[in-house]
Image: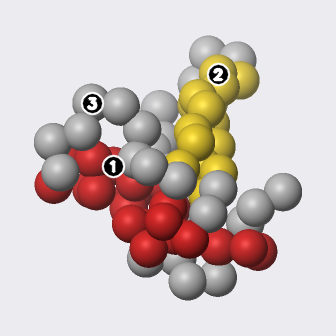
Amino acid sequence: MYNFRTDLASERREIYQKANHLENEVPGIESEELQEGENIKITKVRILNEQGAHAIRKADWKLYYH
């Protein structure tokens, strides 16, 4: 199985959680994990507001918010 990571938002979210000893979600961020078949895991990270964007350093957060 290959381990591909293509979006830094997910990685930055994990780093922020570890650095701040958070067990729950980062304020201003939502995430969802999906399983596609046996070998594909998708993590959707949704930046909800400026607080979340600041936490993971995504200044252009409105581009990611749907």
Position of 40 compared to 18: left or right? right
| Residue at the outermost right position | 66
Q: Marks 1 and 2: CB-CB under 8 Å?
A: no
Amino acid at pointer 1: Glu
Choose top left, top right, bottom left or bottom right for residue 30: top right
The amino acid type found where label 3 is placed reads Glu
Q: Which residue lies furthest to the top in this view?
A: 38
Which label is found at residue 62?
Answer: none
Residue at 65% from the left image edge and 73% from the top image edge: 61
Image spot of residue 34 (x, y percent)? 65, 26
Callout 2: 10 Å neighbours few (<14), some, many (20+)? Answer: few
Q: Which residue is drawn at 70% across and 18% down?
A: 37
The residues tagged by marks 2 and 3 sit, at their Cα atoms, a distance apart of 21 Å
Confirm or deny contact between disc 3 and disc 1 (CB under 8 A): no
Tell whether 22 sits left or right of 26.
left
Height in image: 45 above or below 39? below
The percent coordinates of residue 26 (x first, y second) are 40, 47
Residue 52 x/y as whole percent: 50, 61
What secondary structure is found at the residue carrying circle 2?
strand
Q: Earlier in the sequence, mark 3 or mark 1?
A: 1
Between label 3 and label 1, give the one nearer the viewer.
Answer: 3
Q: Is residue 37 visible?
A: yes
Question: Is 31 situated above or below 65?
Answer: above
Q: Distance between the residues labelled 3 and 1?
A: 10 Å
- Ranked by sequence position, the earlier of labels 1 and 2 is 1
Most foreground residue, 44 or 21: 21
Q: Residue 10: percent from the left, percent from the top?
A: 48, 53
- What residue sits right under mark 1 in the picture? 14
Residue position for label 3: 23
Judged from the image, the secondary structure of the residue bearing numbered disc 3 is loop
Which residue is disc 2 drawn over? 35
Mark 1 and mark 2: span between their CA atoms? 19 Å
